[in-house]
Amino acid sequence: MGIIRDRMVADLELRRYSTGTINHYVREAARFVAHFTKAPGRLGPEEVRSYLLHRVRVDKVGPTQHKMAVAGIKFLYEVTLKKPEVVAEIPWPKIPRTLPVILSGSEVQALLEAIESITYRAVVMCAYGAGVRIQEACTLKPSDIDRKRSVIRVEAGKRKRDRYVPLSAKLLATLEIYWRSARPPAPHVYLFPSSEPGSHVRPETVRAALKAAAQKAGVVKRTTPHILRHSFATHLLETGVDIRTIQVLLGHASIRTTERYVQVSTQHIGRVTSPLDLIGTKAGEVLG
Protein backbone atom coordinates (compact mmCIF):
# COMPACT_ATOMS: atom_id res chain seq x y z
CA MET A 1 0.00 0.00 0.00
CA GLY A 2 3.06 2.26 0.10
CA ILE A 3 2.28 5.72 1.44
CA ILE A 4 -1.13 4.64 2.78
CA ARG A 5 0.53 1.82 4.71
CA ASP A 6 2.98 4.27 6.29
CA ARG A 7 0.12 6.59 7.25
CA MET A 8 -1.82 3.70 8.76
CA VAL A 9 1.18 2.63 10.83
CA ALA A 10 1.64 6.23 12.03
CA ASP A 11 -2.07 6.50 12.92
CA LEU A 12 -1.85 3.29 14.96
CA GLU A 13 1.33 4.42 16.70
CA LEU A 14 -0.19 7.79 17.60
CA ARG A 15 -3.03 5.90 19.30
CA ARG A 16 -0.44 3.83 21.18
CA TYR A 17 -1.45 0.47 19.78
CA SER A 18 0.91 -2.38 20.62
CA THR A 19 3.44 -3.57 18.06
CA GLY A 20 1.58 -6.85 17.69
CA THR A 21 -1.75 -5.15 17.02
CA ILE A 22 -0.17 -2.77 14.50
CA ASN A 23 1.32 -5.69 12.59
CA HIS A 24 -2.00 -7.57 12.57
CA TYR A 25 -4.08 -4.57 11.44
CA VAL A 26 -1.66 -3.56 8.68
CA ARG A 27 -1.31 -7.15 7.47
CA GLU A 28 -5.09 -7.57 7.21
CA ALA A 29 -5.53 -4.25 5.44
CA ALA A 30 -2.75 -5.07 2.97
CA ARG A 31 -4.26 -8.50 2.28
CA PHE A 32 -7.60 -6.85 1.50
CA VAL A 33 -6.04 -4.36 -0.93
CA ALA A 34 -3.95 -7.06 -2.62
CA HIS A 35 -7.08 -9.17 -3.13
CA PHE A 36 -8.46 -6.57 -5.57
CA THR A 37 -5.13 -5.13 -6.80
CA LYS A 38 -6.64 -1.67 -6.60
CA ALA A 39 -5.96 1.38 -4.47
CA PRO A 40 -8.15 1.22 -1.31
CA GLY A 41 -9.64 4.61 -2.15
CA ARG A 42 -11.23 3.05 -5.24
CA LEU A 43 -12.87 0.24 -3.27
CA GLY A 44 -16.25 0.48 -1.59
CA PRO A 45 -18.67 -1.33 0.74
CA GLU A 46 -19.43 -4.11 -1.74
CA GLU A 47 -15.76 -4.96 -2.16
CA VAL A 48 -15.28 -5.04 1.61
CA ARG A 49 -18.31 -7.30 2.01
CA SER A 50 -17.28 -9.67 -0.78
CA TYR A 51 -13.73 -9.88 0.55
CA LEU A 52 -14.85 -10.80 4.06
CA LEU A 53 -17.22 -13.43 2.64
CA HIS A 54 -14.27 -14.82 0.68
CA ARG A 55 -12.26 -15.04 3.89
CA VAL A 56 -15.08 -16.93 5.62
CA ARG A 57 -16.25 -19.19 2.77
CA VAL A 58 -13.05 -19.84 0.84
CA ASP A 59 -10.19 -19.24 3.27
CA LYS A 60 -12.23 -20.80 6.10
CA VAL A 61 -10.85 -18.38 8.70
CA GLY A 62 -12.09 -18.73 12.25
CA PRO A 63 -14.06 -16.05 14.15
CA THR A 64 -10.94 -14.53 15.72
CA GLN A 65 -9.14 -14.08 12.40
CA HIS A 66 -12.38 -12.80 10.86
CA LYS A 67 -12.64 -10.19 13.60
CA MET A 68 -9.01 -9.14 13.06
CA ALA A 69 -9.70 -8.66 9.33
CA VAL A 70 -12.72 -6.49 10.11
CA ALA A 71 -10.71 -4.47 12.64
CA GLY A 72 -7.86 -3.82 10.23
CA ILE A 73 -10.13 -2.79 7.36
CA LYS A 74 -12.31 -0.62 9.58
CA PHE A 75 -9.28 1.21 10.93
CA LEU A 76 -7.97 1.74 7.40
CA TYR A 77 -11.18 3.43 6.25
CA GLU A 78 -12.39 5.09 9.44
CA VAL A 79 -9.07 6.60 10.55
CA THR A 80 -6.42 6.58 7.82
CA LEU A 81 -8.58 7.20 4.74
CA LYS A 82 -11.31 9.09 6.63
CA LYS A 83 -14.05 7.27 4.74
CA PRO A 84 -16.10 5.72 7.55
CA GLU A 85 -19.11 5.29 5.27
CA VAL A 86 -17.31 2.47 3.43
CA VAL A 87 -17.35 0.22 6.51
CA ALA A 88 -20.36 1.64 8.36
CA GLU A 89 -22.54 -1.38 7.60
CA ILE A 90 -19.85 -4.04 8.11
CA PRO A 91 -20.79 -6.06 11.23
CA TRP A 92 -18.44 -7.34 13.89
CA PRO A 93 -18.44 -11.15 13.98
CA LYS A 94 -19.57 -12.95 17.10
CA ILE A 95 -16.70 -14.62 18.93
CA PRO A 96 -17.67 -17.80 20.82
CA ARG A 97 -16.47 -17.84 24.43
CA THR A 98 -14.39 -21.00 24.54
CA LEU A 99 -12.72 -22.33 27.67
CA PRO A 100 -8.91 -22.19 27.61
CA VAL A 101 -6.74 -25.31 27.73
CA ILE A 102 -5.20 -25.76 31.18
CA LEU A 103 -2.04 -27.75 31.86
CA SER A 104 -1.57 -29.72 35.06
CA GLY A 105 1.32 -29.00 37.38
CA SER A 106 3.12 -32.16 36.30
CA GLU A 107 2.71 -31.19 32.64
CA VAL A 108 4.20 -27.76 33.31
CA GLN A 109 7.14 -29.37 35.09
CA ALA A 110 7.72 -31.79 32.21
CA LEU A 111 7.70 -28.92 29.72
CA LEU A 112 10.21 -26.87 31.68
CA GLU A 113 12.54 -29.83 32.05
CA ALA A 114 12.34 -30.53 28.30
CA ILE A 115 13.47 -27.02 27.26
CA GLU A 116 17.21 -27.35 26.66
CA SER A 117 18.00 -23.64 26.21
CA ILE A 118 18.38 -21.87 29.56
CA THR A 119 17.27 -18.64 27.87
CA TYR A 120 14.00 -20.04 26.55
CA ARG A 121 13.40 -21.94 29.79
CA ALA A 122 13.75 -18.69 31.74
CA VAL A 123 11.32 -16.87 29.42
CA VAL A 124 8.78 -19.69 29.65
CA MET A 125 9.12 -19.75 33.44
CA CYS A 126 8.21 -16.05 33.44
CA ALA A 127 5.06 -16.86 31.44
CA TYR A 128 3.97 -19.49 33.96
CA GLY A 129 5.65 -18.37 37.19
CA ALA A 130 4.54 -14.73 36.91
CA GLY A 131 1.58 -15.06 34.55
CA VAL A 132 2.94 -12.51 32.08
CA ARG A 133 2.18 -12.40 28.36
CA ILE A 134 4.94 -13.67 26.09
CA GLN A 135 5.59 -10.18 24.68
CA GLU A 136 5.85 -8.86 28.22
CA ALA A 137 8.30 -11.61 29.16
CA CYS A 138 10.51 -11.04 26.13
CA THR A 139 10.75 -7.28 26.76
CA LEU A 140 11.60 -7.43 30.46
CA LYS A 141 14.62 -5.37 31.54
CA PRO A 142 17.11 -6.29 34.27
CA SER A 143 15.85 -3.33 36.30
CA ASP A 144 12.33 -4.82 36.29
CA ILE A 145 13.47 -7.62 38.61
CA ASP A 146 13.04 -6.39 42.20
CA ARG A 147 14.77 -8.98 44.37
CA LYS A 148 14.21 -7.15 47.65
CA ARG A 149 10.44 -6.91 47.24
CA SER A 150 10.14 -10.23 45.34
CA VAL A 151 8.20 -8.64 42.49
CA ILE A 152 8.61 -8.06 38.77
CA ARG A 153 7.60 -4.76 37.24
CA VAL A 154 5.74 -5.24 33.96
CA GLU A 155 6.16 -1.98 32.13
CA ALA A 156 3.49 -0.76 29.70
CA GLY A 157 1.70 -4.07 29.31
CA LYS A 158 -1.51 -4.42 27.35
CA ARG A 159 -3.44 -1.13 27.18
CA LYS A 160 -0.13 0.53 28.26
CA ARG A 161 -0.67 -0.15 31.97
CA ASP A 162 2.19 -0.94 34.32
CA ARG A 163 1.68 -3.58 36.99
CA TYR A 164 3.60 -5.75 39.44
CA VAL A 165 3.61 -9.54 39.45
CA PRO A 166 5.21 -11.95 41.94
CA LEU A 167 8.82 -13.03 41.59
CA SER A 168 8.95 -16.62 42.79
CA ALA A 169 12.07 -18.01 44.44
CA LYS A 170 12.38 -20.69 41.74
CA LEU A 171 12.08 -18.15 38.95
CA LEU A 172 14.68 -15.89 40.57
CA ALA A 173 17.08 -18.83 40.92
CA THR A 174 16.60 -19.71 37.24
CA LEU A 175 17.13 -16.09 36.17
CA GLU A 176 20.38 -15.97 38.15
CA ILE A 177 21.63 -19.18 36.50
CA TYR A 178 20.61 -17.84 33.10
CA TRP A 179 22.36 -14.51 33.65
CA ARG A 180 25.60 -16.15 34.76
CA SER A 181 25.63 -18.69 31.92
CA ALA A 182 24.33 -16.53 29.05
CA ARG A 183 26.29 -13.40 30.01
CA PRO A 184 24.28 -11.05 27.77
CA PRO A 185 26.52 -8.47 26.08
CA ALA A 186 26.56 -4.93 27.44
CA PRO A 187 24.69 -2.66 27.39
CA HIS A 188 21.95 -4.80 28.93
CA VAL A 189 18.86 -3.12 27.47
CA TYR A 190 16.75 -6.26 27.82
CA LEU A 191 16.87 -9.16 30.22
CA PHE A 192 16.61 -11.56 27.27
CA PRO A 193 18.54 -9.85 24.44
CA SER A 194 18.79 -11.28 20.96
CA SER A 195 21.88 -11.42 18.78
CA GLU A 196 20.74 -8.15 17.22
CA PRO A 197 22.06 -5.18 19.26
CA GLY A 198 19.39 -3.39 21.25
CA SER A 199 16.74 -6.03 20.52
CA HIS A 200 15.15 -8.80 22.57
CA VAL A 201 14.44 -12.47 21.97
CA ARG A 202 11.46 -12.88 19.66
CA PRO A 203 8.20 -14.39 20.93
CA GLU A 204 8.05 -16.61 17.84
CA THR A 205 11.31 -18.35 18.75
CA VAL A 206 10.06 -18.97 22.29
CA ARG A 207 6.83 -20.47 20.94
CA ALA A 208 8.84 -22.77 18.67
CA ALA A 209 11.05 -23.87 21.57
CA LEU A 210 7.98 -24.56 23.71
CA LYS A 211 6.33 -26.58 20.94
CA ALA A 212 9.47 -28.70 20.55
CA ALA A 213 9.58 -29.22 24.32
CA ALA A 214 5.95 -30.38 24.34
CA GLN A 215 6.72 -33.01 21.71
CA LYS A 216 9.81 -34.14 23.60
CA ALA A 217 7.93 -34.32 26.92
CA GLY A 218 4.94 -36.11 25.39
CA VAL A 219 2.47 -33.38 26.36
CA VAL A 220 -0.46 -33.88 23.99
CA LYS A 221 -2.46 -30.81 25.00
CA ARG A 222 -2.11 -27.68 22.90
CA THR A 223 0.83 -25.82 24.40
CA THR A 224 1.63 -22.13 23.95
CA PRO A 225 3.05 -19.42 26.23
CA HIS A 226 -0.46 -18.00 26.62
CA ILE A 227 -1.76 -21.38 27.78
CA LEU A 228 0.90 -21.26 30.49
CA ARG A 229 -0.54 -17.89 31.51
CA HIS A 230 -4.02 -19.45 31.64
CA SER A 231 -2.61 -22.29 33.72
CA PHE A 232 -0.97 -19.78 36.11
CA ALA A 233 -4.34 -18.10 36.73
CA THR A 234 -6.26 -21.35 37.16
CA HIS A 235 -3.66 -22.84 39.50
CA LEU A 236 -3.76 -19.70 41.64
CA LEU A 237 -7.53 -20.02 41.90
CA GLU A 238 -7.25 -23.68 42.85
CA THR A 239 -4.78 -22.85 45.62
CA GLY A 240 -7.14 -20.32 47.18
CA VAL A 241 -6.10 -16.96 45.70
CA ASP A 242 -9.15 -14.70 45.30
CA ILE A 243 -10.26 -13.78 41.80
CA ARG A 244 -9.82 -10.02 42.32
CA THR A 245 -6.11 -10.54 43.09
CA ILE A 246 -5.77 -12.75 40.01
CA GLN A 247 -7.37 -10.00 37.91
CA VAL A 248 -4.75 -7.50 39.09
CA LEU A 249 -1.87 -9.92 38.50
CA LEU A 250 -3.04 -10.69 34.95
CA GLY A 251 -3.67 -7.04 34.15
CA HIS A 252 -7.28 -7.61 33.10
CA ALA A 253 -9.33 -4.43 32.74
CA SER A 254 -12.57 -6.28 33.52
CA ILE A 255 -13.27 -8.90 36.18
CA ARG A 256 -15.47 -10.66 33.60
CA THR A 257 -12.35 -11.66 31.67
CA THR A 258 -10.88 -13.25 34.79
CA GLU A 259 -14.10 -15.00 35.83
CA ARG A 260 -13.79 -17.59 33.07
CA TYR A 261 -11.06 -19.28 35.11
CA VAL A 262 -13.74 -20.25 37.61
CA GLN A 263 -15.38 -22.25 34.80
CA VAL A 264 -12.23 -24.24 34.02
CA SER A 265 -11.07 -24.86 37.59
CA THR A 266 -12.38 -28.36 38.33
CA GLN A 267 -11.15 -28.16 41.92
CA HIS A 268 -13.00 -24.88 42.44
CA ILE A 269 -16.17 -26.33 40.94
CA GLY A 270 -15.73 -29.53 42.92
CA ARG A 271 -15.78 -27.58 46.19
CA VAL A 272 -19.27 -26.27 45.44
CA THR A 273 -21.99 -28.08 47.39
CA SER A 274 -25.04 -29.00 45.34
CA PRO A 275 -28.37 -27.91 46.90
CA LEU A 276 -29.46 -31.52 46.45
CA ASP A 277 -27.04 -32.50 49.22
CA LEU A 278 -28.46 -29.81 51.51
CA ILE A 279 -32.12 -30.86 51.32
CA GLY A 280 -33.23 -32.41 54.58
CA THR A 281 -30.20 -31.09 56.53
CA LYS A 282 -29.81 -28.26 59.01
CA ALA A 283 -27.82 -26.22 56.48
CA GLY A 284 -30.58 -26.78 53.92
CA GLU A 285 -33.19 -24.96 56.03
CA VAL A 286 -32.24 -21.74 54.26
CA LEU A 287 -33.72 -23.20 51.11
CA GLY A 288 -37.18 -23.15 52.66
Image: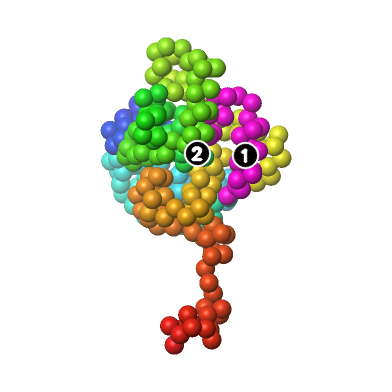
For the N terminus, which image quadrant?
top left
Amino acid type at image mark 2: Gly
Q: Is 153 situated left or right of 169 in this image?
A: left
When asked about the image quadrant of residue 117, the answer is top right
Q: Was residue 123 drawn as part of the magenta stretch in this picture?
A: yes
Residue that carries the numbered disc 1 in the rendered image:
109
Rendering coords of residue 157 (x, y %): 37, 37
When asked about the image quadrant of residue 144, the answer is top left
At x 44%, y 35%, the residue is 167
Local crowd size for mark 2, using a 10 Å CA cut-off: few (<14), some (14–19), many (≥20): many
Between 140 and 145, the residue placed more toward the observer is 145
Residue that carries the numbered disc 2 in the rendered image:
129
Q: Which mark is residue 44?
A: none
Q: Was residue 186 drawn as part of the magenta stretch in this picture?
A: no
Q: Secondary structure at mark 2?
A: helix
Tell me the magenta residue range: 102-126
Does residue 33 appear anywhere in the picture? no
Local crowd size for mark 1, using a 10 Å CA cut-off: few (<14), some (14–19), many (≥20): few
For the C terminus, which image quadrant?
bottom left
Rendering coords of residue 263 (x, y %): 51, 60
Q: Earlier in the sequence, mark 2 or mark 1?
A: 1
Rendering coords of residue 125 (x, y %): 53, 34
At x 45%, y 85%, the residue is 285
Q: CA distance from mark 2 to mark 1?
A: 11 Å
Chief secondary structure of the magenta portion? helix
Q: Is 171 situated left or right of 243 in this image?
A: right
Rendering coords of residue 24 (x, y %): 45, 37
When asked about the image quadrant of residue 197, the answer is top left
Between 199 and 56, the residue placed more toward the observer is 199
Amino acid type at image mark 1: Gln
